[in-house]
Image (tube, rainbow, N blue to C red):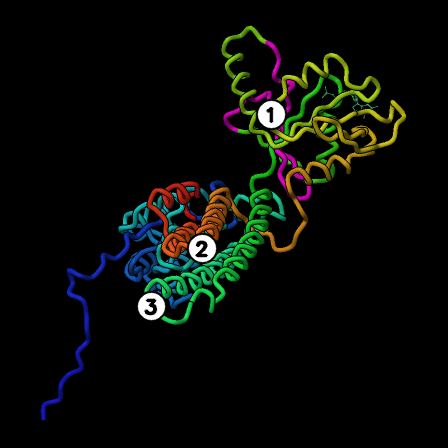
Amino acid sequence: MEQRRPTTVRPEPSHRPDPPATIAAIATPAGRGGIGIVRISGGELGALAAALSGKQPAPRRAVVADFKAADGSVIDRGLLLHFPAPHSFTGEDVLELHAHGGPVVVHMLLGRCLELGARMAEPGEFTRRAFLNGKIDLAQAEAVIDLIDAETQAAARSAVRSLQGEFSREIQGLLDELIALRVLVEATLDFPDEEIDFLTAGDALGRLARLDERLRRVFSRARQGRLLRGGLQVVLAGQPNVGKSSLLNRLAGDELAIVTPHPGTTRDLVRGTLHVEGIPLHVIDTAGLRETSDQVEKIGIERSWRELERADVVVHLVDANFGVGEEDRAIADRLPVGPARITVENKIDLAQRPAARGETGSGVLIALSAKTGEGIELLRHELLNLAGWQPAEGVFTARERHLSALNETATHLAEARALSNRLELFAEELRLAQSALATITGGFSSDELLGEIFSRFCIGK
Ligand code: GDP
């Protein structure tokens, strides 16, 4: 009897998805270093590895290889690593070429990869592929860039926590509960004549309340993460010689002060960024906001005043020896009214007064000495307090996008509760809550959103 050959089901060639374009980039920073890495990702990279090095490296094993130019001359000797799909960062075939870290060598290697059919990777394209291939979700992809950009240990730790999926798991937990609730509601809608009242039996409103509570806890952790990432805009105002620079230096204390001028603002307006308990404080000194007749400068200064409106906190310094005088009041009147206000009476060492905290009609008053440091803790504490910072374990990095999605989810849940006696509207609000929540991990994301997120990456990541 004729043996039938087993049939393998293969899609017709025309139905097979195109293999991903092979992309390559230098993954290490520009400049000289011990090692420079070129990373390549694509459909099937065995042929490229062979053409480049004459070797077929075993999966995930480092092999020493001569990387060769088209004419057979050696560009460099280094390590070749092959991570076959799907067990790689991008989920595709990945090659890493570890060469000596000179800019010319790594550029020659990259050039050779391009000759062999790769194209230059776009910013964030490796991570974007990791997301599209389901290796990481959107919140994790964002955490990659947050980890790279982290300026403090606390920010790095929170980014790693998100990268490892802690934030995503919280979101997934919320989604699971929301979906379970939707199932109840949809069942009730589908079987309106059933005897059982699914909603009462399933304690729909109780579930909704618990979901809301859990959402609040996630929001508060995410908000801390956003603070760690984005920090606080602090405006420092006061007459000349009142001690603004001294206070800035004192606040920086033994914290690492990284002075980074902010793009888009007048140079002499901004002092830079310092960190208090890992939170970046972007301090703007209004000393640059002087009266001027120069038209160009005038426009810049007007723009700066508008920017001050968006500050989180205004710290207004006065001299403790004189209290709030006429000129101080003139400055105070010009300061934006939106942000929280702290009046600082500086130089208490001269005035021979103790450090203190009090309340005034327009905000908090703190008496301190920038020179001796007395009372500085009161100010630090107040700044963190106003920022809503509570030193907490388990903060995960988050951005405005996440917070607005959580807010939107909460709004739909509140609407759902208000409409709980109108079943179809109740169901619709729950559906909207779910789609808002799912944008965080990328369940429903538009191409524009993905473009926006990944364009902020560096090339090679
Ligand atoms: P700015 O013009 O507002 O930036 O003021 P500075 O920080 O340059 O300070 C002006 C002068 O006041 C300097 O001589 C400082 O040493 C002094 N100063 C600042 N803070 C204090 C303080 O708390 N106590 C005393 N005794 N002197 C201070």
- Give how far apart the Cα atoms at labels 3 and 2 are: 18 Å
Q: What residue sits right under mark 1 in the picture?
A: 270
Density class for disc 1 (Cα within 10 Å; few <14, some 14-19, many ≥20) is: many
The image shows residue 317, relative to residue 189, as above or below, that is above
Which label belongs to residue 420?
A: 2
Let me know if residue 238 appears in the view. Answer: yes
Residue 268: which quarter of the image?
Answer: top right
Instruction: Please state which amino acid type lies under the numbered disc 1.
Output: Val
The image shows residue 345, relative to residue 205, as above or below, that is above
- Give how far apart the Cα atoms at labels 1 and 2 are: 51 Å
Q: Secondary structure at mark 2?
A: loop
Q: Secondary structure at mark 3?
A: loop
Instruction: Please state which amino acid type lies under the numbered disc 3.
Output: Asp
Q: Earlier in the sequence, mark 1 or mark 2?
A: 1
Q: What residue sits right under mark 3 in the picture?
A: 193
User: Residue 136 vs residue 395: left or right?
Assistant: left
Q: Earlier in the sequence, mark 1 or mark 3?
A: 3
Q: Is mark 1 within 8 Å of ligand 1?
A: no
> In the rendered image, which quarter contains the N terminus?
bottom left
Query: Could you tell me residue 217's position as x and y percent?
Result: 58, 53
Which label belongs to residue 355?
A: none
**Is 247 part of what is drawn in magenta?**
no
Q: Which residues are magenta?
A: 263-291
Q: Is mark 2 within 8 Å of ligand 1?
A: no
